[in-house]
Each structure stands twice: as structure tokens, then as C-alpha cells.
Image (cartoon, helix red, strand yellow):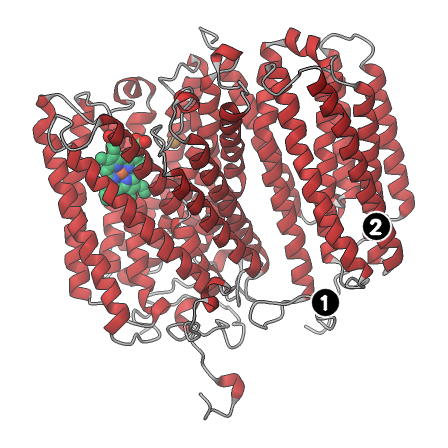
């Protein structure tokens, strides 16, 4: 570097600085994004191992691999880690951090130090939960009372950990909202914003305003166990269903915290590889806000069999169907964007297409569950397990993998092996469907969830599902190895390998420390594909 | 760009206004305390909450300068309140329309 | 920037006007979060109060209305001094600001002392958070509020020291205004807690 004389023109990639301190004390949004990316990927793999163990137990009807109590602990850990450590911070904290400033033409987020603080708080939460593993909870990730108030496993520490993670999520959301309001480059009007930004904004609002309610709920659960408070205890005049009302006031919006950023990712990938302007920009943008808003109105559809009143159940069932509208608007617009496009099947595009297909299945089966009468039968069966995995893996995880493959060259300045990536995608797609599609049938036939054993009549479909989990696991291993190998000896990535129009592709790969040498002046939206050239 | 002043004008409230607001808050506090000694039945609740809400509003408007903030601040000041109303409203709807009240 | 009191991540400087409005918006967002954090308790209050009106009525008389009223006056007064402090800083009067913040801090401490006597009187009568639903609500709502008072006091203490050091001027006083917003929230919540618990139990 010493030879360069024109100091302000030197391109210093943000990855240049080495040393552990340059990471844990960084306030650079791109590095903080990497910290999150590593953390959530790690927890995804850990919880994935738990999932494989769960499925291995379910290979045969008897509980021959682990004891039922161990099984309960395993699904609690699998569910809690996947939800609170991986998928809720997930795309928002990793790609949100990396992309938001780049896409809106800003040097960083509005509060860089607070951003680092959020990450530390996230770490603190994980440490607390790790300590809780000394006597792991067996309540399921939902911590329902009255069981969670009485079991002698360690519920207090794990809920405290989740409470702390919630704060991290709140502060990240706060930071992003302010960033998007105040830091947009000149000319970057709301209707020129990339759709990922609209999605991140909607997500951030949910993070900010839904999370505190689960925070207080978990605190109340903790006081129930420590101070003898009785809000959820019928013996003391409390009401266990109240816990569920509070819990789902957060946790339904939380499923949109998980999925909306993935929808944003898909809206970025599809037009690039269909070489067509996105169809229905405004409809997609505002439907993100619409989904976020409606998601506050439907929480009790998780409680139809919990003894809530018929009136409440009817209202909530009706409102649940409303969510289908903005969601379908998105799916139709993506499909219309694909129509007559010149489609290039890059691995990122394959994940995006998988998203559209699998998420549609997940979403439509959600309507079955939202229908009052059907849910009485389907509630707490494998139908629910299948539905939620179609949404969470088929939706969010596909979006996450798509984002990984799409922005990988930009973030790390290297390329991965595209052929191997496609093979991994194939394993993941097949494995996923073999694992979870049979579970719809199992559920309809009445197989309940959260049991280590099952009647022999379910054996063929159950073991099919377990075989599928092995294919899925193999695919994820291939993908992980391929992406890590690319970091080590991948080719150097060009600045803009796919000819994308959004701002992050107009800076070198990896981006320089300050993102833009000069803050850009934006004159157009970033979806004008296929017009010229 | 040169006409755009960076030192954004912000409104400075006079101490006189503050003291008037404070006096109003004190008067309203006195009213609620006084009213609590008289029995109006359920109206006691209504009066207390209405007065509290007026007090809270003027604290927000004047002490917190909400009156001079832009629309986005208003949105984020009011939207959480509507969510709170939703949480309370729908939970109550459920609890008190159950056929078996637990 | 000129005064150099705010450092930025990697040397790029944020436009002070943007920084000012960002910080303020950020604090308002945080207040929204806080309101919903208390929201769970307010919702629990609403439900149990509707379910057990007699319990609330019989037990709220155990609370000391006078102490509650005194504390209300203290907090409202502290909000006044805080607001005046912010205005004084905007006019560049550092000394006046420091004194007003100090008075605010003293009020907050006074509030804590009164609360301490209230709590010990309750414990003396063997009233604890697990005594009844009403007292669970009383202790949790006032306890969570007290926690916010302490956080507010910590913020005010930092602002006091920085004001004395002359870090704030008529041009740059964002932290004072934003910290003030937080302190007013403490007041706002108490404005509801006082009647709900002490007056209409
Ligand atoms: C790697 C592939 C995965 C497999 C094979 C798998 C398998 C399973 C199994 C067997 C259960 C327990 C069902 C029961 O007995 O009730 C379960 C539950 C669950 N999984 Fe997964 N899972 C996978 C990935 C994920 C992902 C990516 C997420 C979320 C991001 C997730 C979230 C959940 C949740 C929330 C539960 C519910 C736990 C509960 O019932 O309390 N899973 N999964
Ligand atoms: Cu839901």
C-alpha cells in the first residue's frame, strides 16, 4: 500500500484489517453482518444436528434411541435454537446489516455503536442459554404454562436468555428504521428503494413493536417461578391461556420477522436472473407493510383448541384469511416477473424458484390451519410440523441460501463452485420434500407432534421422512463445504458478476471500508432490466 | 445546497409555557385524588383514566415537544398505543366471552 | 462538526442535522418499545381488575395514597425541571442546565426514597408479590417502573457530568434532549400507575 500516493483514491477492502480486536470492536456494518452470519450459521448447524437426532429416534416406532424425556429436551433445544438464535436474527441481522447501507447509498447504519451493542447483547443471550443447558428445559420452544411453571428443568435461565436476545432484536430493528428514514442517498426516494429495503423496514417495525410483549411475558413466567406470582396459575386466580395470548401476540408477528426478509431477497434475485423489471413494484413494496400490519391481528389462530372463546376464535379465524391477500400479491407478482423472462438458472435463482414453490405450499396449508373447523382436527399433529417447516425451510431457509449464493461474491470478493452449488441445491430440494411432504399425510391421519414413539401404522411414512432428513443433511453439508472452499481458494469475484443494477453492485467486491468513495446521486429505481443492451 | 441551513431551527419552548403546563398537571393530579374519595361507581375509573390521558398527552406534547415533531414521529408515538389497545381489547374479548370462564 | 465531541465509526462525519433528527427518532422508537413492554402488565391489570373487582377494591386501600400522591408531585416536578433544562441548553446556558439536571436527579432519588418506605411498610405487613394477584401487579408494575427510574438516573448522571465538562452547547445538545425524552417516559408511565393502583383499585 505504501506506494500509492493519491491517498483518498486507495481502495481498502473492508476485510483488509486483521486481528480479533478488529472484529469484536468493529462498528462497520459489513463486519457486524459477518459476525451475525457466522453465529447464526453455527446455530443453524447445531440445531440441525438436533433435528437429525430427533428424526433418527423417529425411524422406528419404539423409543429405542433416546428416552422420551431426552426427546422432549431435544425438540425444545432444536425449536428454541432454530427460532431464537437462527431464524429471528437470521436474514435481518446478517444480510440486513450488510445490505441496507449499501443499497440505500449510506456509509453505515444510523447508530454504528448501537449496532455493535446489539451483537454483543445477542452473544450475551447465547451465553445465558448455554449455561441453561446444564439442566435443559423440556417445555418446547413455546414455554407454555402451566407446565413451564412447574417442570423441574431450568426454564428460568433459558427464558432469560431469550429475553436478552429479544433486546438485541429490538435494537437492531430500531437502528434499521432510523437508517432507512434518515440515511438514504440523495435521489433515493421511497419508490426507488430496492424491495429488500422495504422488506427490511417492515421486519424492523415488527422487531421493534412485537418483541417487547414477549419480553414481558417471559419476565412474568420467570417471576411466576421465582417470586410466586400467579398471573398464569389457576390455583392463584390466574389464567394459563393468558400466557398464550401474550406469547402469540409476539410469536405470530415473529413468523413474519422470519419470512419477510426472505421475501425481500427473492424480489431482488428474480428480476436479475429473469432479466426483466420487477412486476408490480409498488404492490410488492406495500404488501410488505400490509403483511406486517395484519400479522398483529391474527395471533389467536394458534389457540383455537386452547379453550379461547368462540367469538374470539371466529374473529381471529376470519382475520387470518386476510394475511393471504398481501402474501398472494407477492407470489403473483414474482410469477408475473418470471413470465416471458430470459431465465438464467444460477444457483441463487434455483433457491429463489424453490422458495416460490415451497413457500406457496407452506402458505396454503396455513390456510387449512387458520380455518377453525379444520384446525380442531389438525392442531398439534404432524400437519403443523410440515406446514411450519415448509414456511421456515421452504421459505426462509431457501431465501437465506439464495441470499448466500447471490451476494457471496460481493461480500467476500470470491466465487464458489457453481456446479457443486447446483448439486447441493438438488439434494436440499429433494431431501426437504421427502422429509416434510409425508408429514402432511401423517398429520391428517392423526399422528400428534412432540412424541418420541408412535403406532406401528405410521412407520413407513415416518421412516421415509427420516431418510429424507439424511438427504437434506447431505445437501447442507455439500453446500457448506462448497461455500467455505470458495472463501479459501475461490476465484476473485468481479465487481458485478450478474449485471445487477442496485447500488451494492456498483462498488468493488468486497466493498471498500467506507462503502462509497462519494455518496451516490440516485436517478432511477434499480429494476430497469432488459431495457437497453 | 447552499441555501439549505444545516443548523436546523428547532423550537425552544419558553419557561412560561412549561410552568403553565406544570400547573395544569398539578391541578389535574389534585382533581383525581379528590375524586377518588367520592364514590361514582364505575365512573371513578373513567374519570381517573380520562384525566391521566389528558395529563400524559400534555406531557408528550409540551415537555417532550411532540407538538413540534414531524409526522413520522407521530406515527411511531401513536402506533404502539394502538397495538396496546389491540392487545388489551382482544385479550379481554377472549377472556370474557368464554363459555367456561376458567 | 467542530466540537469533535461525537466520534464516528470510521472517521466519516454525519451531518449534524441528520444526527440530531436520527437520535430523536431513535429515542421515540425506543419509547414505543417501552410502552409495549409495560403493555403486558397493563393488559394483565385490565383483565384481572375486570375479573376480580372486589379484590382490587379491598386491597388497594392497603396502599398509601398520600405517599403515592407525593411521589406523583415529585415526578411531575422533575419532568418540569428536565424540560426546562433542555430549553436552557438550547439557549446555551450550561450552568443553568447543570443545576436543573441536578434538581431532576434529586427528585428521582426522592422518589426512590419514598418508594423504599412504601415497600418496607408492605413487607412489614407481610405483603409480598405472591400475596395476591393485586399485589403481584402492584409490585411488578411499580418495580419495573422503579427499574426505569434507576436507568433514567444513570443517564441523567452522565448528562450532568458532561454538561459540567462543557460538552454541550446551544448548537450541539442532542444527548440532553434525547436523555430528557427518556426521563419524561418515566413520568408518563407513573401518570397511569398512580390512579390505577392507588386510586381506583
Ligand atoms: C434440517 C432440517 C430439519 C429437520 C429434519 C427438522 C426436524 C424436526 C423435528 C423432527 C421436529 C420435532 C417434531 C415433533 O416431534 O414435534 C421439529 C420441530 C421443530 N422445528 Fe425442525 N427440523 C429442521 C429444520 C428446522 C428449521 C430450519 C427450523 C426453523 C428455522 C425448524 C423449526 C422447528 C420448530 C419451531 C419446531 C417445533 C419444536 C416444537 O415442537 O416445540 N426446524 N423439527
Ligand atoms: Cu401464526
Quadrant containing the N terminus of chain C in the rendered view: bottom right
Ligand 1, image quadrant it occupies? top left
Residue A349 occupies quadrant: bottom left
The residue that mark 1 highlights is B6
Above/below status of A37 relative to C62: below
Q: Would residue C179 be found to the left or right of residue A242 on screen? A: right
Which residue sits at x=57%, y=21%?
A: C44
Q: Chain of mark 2?
A: C
Above/below status of C137 relative to A491: above
Q: Is residue A194 visible?
A: yes
The picture places residue A347, in percent across and down from the top left corner, at 22, 60
Above/below status of B37 relative to A244: above
Which residue sits at x=50%, y=42%?
A: A164
Q: Which element is circle 2 on?
A: helix
Residue A415 occupies quadrant: bottom left
Q: Is mark 2 within 8 Å of ligand 2?
A: no
Q: Which element is circle 1 on?
A: loop
Q: Is mark 1 within 8 Å of ligand 1?
A: no
The picture places residue C176, in percent across and down from the top left corner, at 75, 53
The residue that mark 2 highlights is C85
Q: Chain of mark 1?
A: B
Nearest the viewer among A231 and A246 is A231
Estimate how packed mark 1 is, as few (under 14), some (14 to 19) or many (20 or more) residues with alpha carbons within 10 Å.
few
Amino acid at each position: 500500500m505504501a506506494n500509492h500516493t493519491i491517498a483518498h483514491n486507495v481502495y481498502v477492502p473492508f476485510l483488509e484489517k486483521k486481528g480479533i480486536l478488529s472484529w469484536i470492536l468493529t462498528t462497520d456494518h459489513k463486519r457486524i453482518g459477518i459476525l451475525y452470519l457466522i453465529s447464526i450459521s453455527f446455530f443453524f448447524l447445531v440445531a440441525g444436528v438436533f433435528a437429525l437426532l430427533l428424526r433418527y429416534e423417529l425411524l422406528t416406532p419404539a423409543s429405542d434411541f433416546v428416552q422420551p424425556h431426552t426427546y422432549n429436551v431435544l425438540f425444545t433445544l432444536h425449536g428454541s435454537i432454530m427460532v431464537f438464535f437462527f431464524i429471528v436474527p437470521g436474514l435481518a441481522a446478517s444480510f440486513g446489516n450488510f445490505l441496507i447501507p449499501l443499497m440505500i447509498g449510506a456509509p453505515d447504519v444510523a447508530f454504528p455503536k448501537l449496532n455493535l451493542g446489539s451483537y454483543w447483547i445477542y452473544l450475551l443471550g447465547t451465553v445465558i442459554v448455554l449455561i441453561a443447558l446444564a439442566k435443559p428445559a423440556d417445555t418446547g420452544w413455546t414455554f407454555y404454562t402451566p407446565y413451564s411453571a412447574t417442570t423441574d428443568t431450568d426454564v428460568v435461565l433459558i427464558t432469560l436468555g431469550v429475553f436478552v436476545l429479544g433486546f438485541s432484536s429490538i435494537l437492531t430493528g430500531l437502528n434499521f428504521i432510523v437508517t432507512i428514514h434518515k440515511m438514504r442517498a440523495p435521489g433515493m426516494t421511497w419508490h426507488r428503494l430496492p424491495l429488500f429495503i422495504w422488506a427490511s423496514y417492515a421486519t424492523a417495525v415488527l422487531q421493534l413493536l412485537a418483541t417487547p410483549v414477549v419480553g414481558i411475558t417471559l419476565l412474568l413466567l420467570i417471576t411466576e417461578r421465582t417470586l410466586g406470582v400467579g398471573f398464569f396459575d389457576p390455583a392463584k386466580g390466574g389464567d394459563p391461556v393468558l400466557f398464550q395470548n401474550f406469547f402469540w401476540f409476539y410469536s405470530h408477528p415473529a413468523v413474519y420477522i422470519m419470512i419477510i426478509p426472505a421475501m425481500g431477497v427473492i424480489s431482488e434475485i428474480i428480476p436479475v436472473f429473469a432479466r426483466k423489471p420487477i412486476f408490480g413494484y409498488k404492490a410488492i413494496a406495500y404488501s410488505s407493510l400490509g403483511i406486517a400490519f395484519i400479522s398483529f391481528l391474527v395471533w389467536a389462530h394458534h389457540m383455537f383448541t386452547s379453550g379461547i372463546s368462540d367469538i374470539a376464535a371466529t374473529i381471529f379465524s376470519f382475520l387470518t384469511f386476510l394475511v393471504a391477500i398481501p402474501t398472494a400479491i407477492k407470489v403473483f407478482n414474482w410469477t408475473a416477473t418470471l413470465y416471458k423472462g430470459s431465465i438464467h438458472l444460477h444457483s441463487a435463482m434455483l433457491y429463489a424458484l424453490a422458495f416460490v414453490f415451497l413457500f406457496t405450499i407452506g402458505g396454503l396449508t396455513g390456510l387449512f390451519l387458520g380455518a377453525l373447523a379444520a384446525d380442531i382436527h389438525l392442531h398439534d399433529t404432524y400437519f403443523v410440523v410440515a406446514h411450519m417447516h415448509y414456511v421456515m425451510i421452504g421459505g426462509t431457509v431457501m431465501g437465506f441460501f439464495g441470499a448466500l449464493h447471490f451476494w457471496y461474491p460481493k461480500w467476500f470478493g470470491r466465487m464458489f463452485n457453481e456446479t457443486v452449488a447446483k448439486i447441493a441445491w438438488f439434494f436440499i430440494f429433494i431431501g426437504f420434500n421427502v422429509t416434510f411432504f409425508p408429514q402432511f399425510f401423517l398429520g391428517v391421519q392423526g399422528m400428534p407432534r412432540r412424541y418420541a414413539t408412535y403406532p406401528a401404522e405410521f412407520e413407513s411414512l415416518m421412516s421415509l421422512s427420516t431418510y429424507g432428513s439424511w438427504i437434506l443433511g447431505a445437501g447442507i453439508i455439500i453446500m457448506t463445504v462448497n461455500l467455505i472452499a470458495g472463501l479459501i481458494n475461490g476465484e476473485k469475484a468481479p465487481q458485478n458478476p450478474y449485471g445487477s443494477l442496485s447500488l451494492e453492485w456498483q462498488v468493488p467486491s468486497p466493498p471498500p471500508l467506507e462503502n462509497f468513495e462519494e455518496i451516490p446521486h440516485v436517478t432511477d429505481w434499480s429494476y430497469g432490466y432488459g431495457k437497453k443492451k | 445546497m447552499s441555501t439549505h441551513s444545516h443548523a436546523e431551527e428547532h423550537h425552544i419552548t419558553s419557561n412560561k409555557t412549561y410552568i403553565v403546563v406544570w400547573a395544569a398537571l398539578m391541578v389535574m393530579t389534585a382533581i383525581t385524588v379528590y375524586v377518588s374519595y367520592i364514590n361514582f361507581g364505575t365512573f371513578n375509573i373513567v374519570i381517573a383514566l380520562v384525566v391521566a390521558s389528558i395529563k400524559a398527552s400534555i406531557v408528550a406534547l409540551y415537555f417532550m415537544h411532540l407538538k413540534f415533531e414531524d409526522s413520522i414521529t407521530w406515527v411511531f408515538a401513536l402506533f404502539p398505543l394502538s397495538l396496546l389497545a389491540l392487545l388489551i381489547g382482544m385479550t379481554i374479548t377472549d377472556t370474557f366471552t368464554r363459555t367456561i370462564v376458567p | 462538526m467542530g466540537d469533535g465531541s461525537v466520534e464516528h465509526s470510521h472517521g466519516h462525519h454525519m451531518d449534524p442535522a441528520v444526527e440530531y433528527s436520527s437520535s430523536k427518532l431513535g429515542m421515540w422508537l425506543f419509547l414505543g418499545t417501552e410502552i409495549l413492554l409495560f403493555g403486558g402488565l397493563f393488559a394483565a391489570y385490565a383483565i384481572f381488575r375486570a375479573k376480580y373487582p372486589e379484590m382490587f377494591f379491598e386491597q388497594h386501600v392497603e396502599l398509601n395514597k398520600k405517599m403515592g400522591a407525593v411521589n406523583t408531585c415529585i415526578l411531575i416536578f422533575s419532568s418540569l425541571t428536565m424540560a426546562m433544562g433542555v430549553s436552557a441548553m438550547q439557549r446555551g446556558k450550561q450552568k443553568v442546565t447543570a443545576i436543573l439536571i441536578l434538581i431532576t436527579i434529586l427528585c428521582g432519588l426522592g422518589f426512590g426514597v419514598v418508594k423504599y418506605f412504601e415497600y418496607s411498610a408492605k413487607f412489614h405487613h407481610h405483603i409480598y408479590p405472591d400475596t395476591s394477584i393485586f399485589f403481584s401487579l402492584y409490585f411488578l408494575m411499580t418495580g419495573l417502573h422503579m427499574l426505569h427510574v434507576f436507568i433514567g438516573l444513570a443517564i441523567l448522571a452522565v448528562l450532568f457530568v458532561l454538561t459540567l465538562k462543557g460538552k454541550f452547547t446551544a448548537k450541539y445538545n442532542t444527548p440532553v434532549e434525547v436523555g430528557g425524552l427518556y426521563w419524561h417516559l418515566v413520568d408518563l408511565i407513573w401518570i397511569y400507575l398512580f390512579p390505577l393502583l392507588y386510586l381506583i383499585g
